[in-house]
């Protein structure tokens, strides 16, 4: 599962056309199998000249979550060709359950939970004209993550400062993750409020059960 966001450098945005090198990129990845690779990638990109982005940083062994605290990531150990795309903080996720039945020893790991509120606070310069883009595919945790960011006021406060916020999220259904109360609340209330009350540009894509 991964969560990534990018925040623009406002000084360049105000003085001329926005280019990729005006952006910082922050990625979140929970599965420790990718830690070394992402650290090497980060180092290589930061040493590239000219640098393709202003800054690149990966928060490894970290997951998007509703609370900033240590949590459990349940591992997908069966979908190797798809880079274990079904790892999830939800134990009922179908790929997690398939992994349990496969008999693999490594079934869960302790990781750091990271809220969207914290991500915005630590990575975005709240200046008029800035641009934040968040893209997430986090296997069912998207509902609790977005509900938290709405409840904290983080997203509404960001757009209130004339910062453009675009969120692109893959949403997951009951056949994959089971019944989810966070999903019920997001669909019935929070999604509309983020769009109409906060002015967030929210784009959702339905997961096709992989």
Image (cartoon, grey):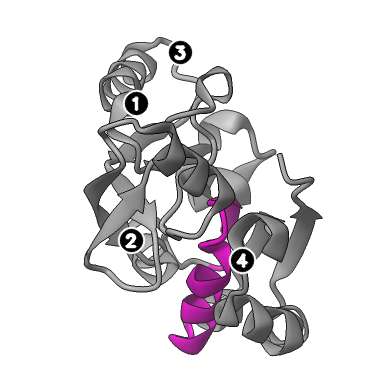
- Nearer the observer, disc 4 or disc 1? 4
Residue 51 on the magenta span: no
Spatial CA distance of label 4 from label 2 is 23 Å
Going from N to C along the chain, the mark reached first, 4 or 2, is: 2
According to the picture, the residue beneath numbered tag 1 turns out to be 34
According to the picture, the residue beneath numbered tag 2 turns out to be 114
- Nearer the observer, disc 1 or disc 2? 1
Going from N to C along the chain, the mark reached first, 4 or 3, is: 3
Most foreground residue, 105 or 121: 105
- Nearer the observer, disc 2 or disc 3? 2
Q: Which residues are magenta?
A: 128-153
User: What residue is drawn where x is 43% and y is 32%?
Assistant: 102
Regarding residue 1, the answer to whether it shows in the image is no
Regarding residue 69, the answer to whether it shows in the image is yes
Going from N to C along the chain, the mark reached first, 2 or 3, is: 3
According to the picture, the residue beneath numbered tag 3 turns out to be 50
User: What residue is drawn where x is 71% and y is 58%?
Assistant: 175
Most foreground residue, 196 or 97: 97
**Left of 25 or right of it: where is 176?**
right
The kind of secondary structure element at disc 1 is helix
Residue 130 on the magenta span: yes
User: What residue is drawn where x is 47% and y is 46%?
Assistant: 96
According to the picture, the residue beneath numbered tag 4 turns out to be 178
**Left of 195 or right of it: where is 108?**
left
Most foreground residue, 192 or 137: 137
Spatial CA distance of label 4 from label 1 is 27 Å
- Nearer the observer, disc 4 or disc 2? 4
């Amino acid at each position: 599962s991964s969560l990534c966001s990018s925040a623009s450098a406002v000084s360049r945005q105000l003085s001329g056309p926005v280019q990729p090198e005006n952006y910082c990129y922050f990625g979140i990845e929970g599965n420790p199998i990718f830690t070394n690779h992402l650290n090497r990638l980060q180092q290589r990109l930061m040493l590239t000249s000219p640098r393709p982005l202003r800054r690149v940083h990966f928060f490894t062994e970290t997951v998007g979550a509703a609370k900033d605290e240590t949590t459990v990531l349940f591992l997908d150990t069966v979908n190797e060709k798809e880079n274990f795309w079904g790892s999830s903080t939800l134990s009922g996720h179908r790929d997690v359950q398939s992994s349990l039945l496969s008999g693999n020893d490594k079934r869960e790991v302790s990781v750091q939970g990271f809220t969207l509120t914290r991500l915005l606070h630590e990575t975005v310069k709240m200046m008029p004209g800035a641009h934040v883009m968040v893209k997430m595919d986090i296997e069912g945790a998207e509902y609790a993550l977005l509900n938290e960011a709405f409840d904290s006021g983080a997203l509404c406060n960001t757009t209130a400062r004339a910062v453009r916020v675009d969120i692109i999220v893959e949403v997951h259904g009951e056949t994959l993750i089971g019944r989810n109360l966070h999903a019920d609340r997001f669909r019935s209330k929070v999604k509309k409020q983020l769009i109409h009350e906060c002015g967030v540009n929210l784009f959702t894509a339905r997961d096709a059960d992989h």
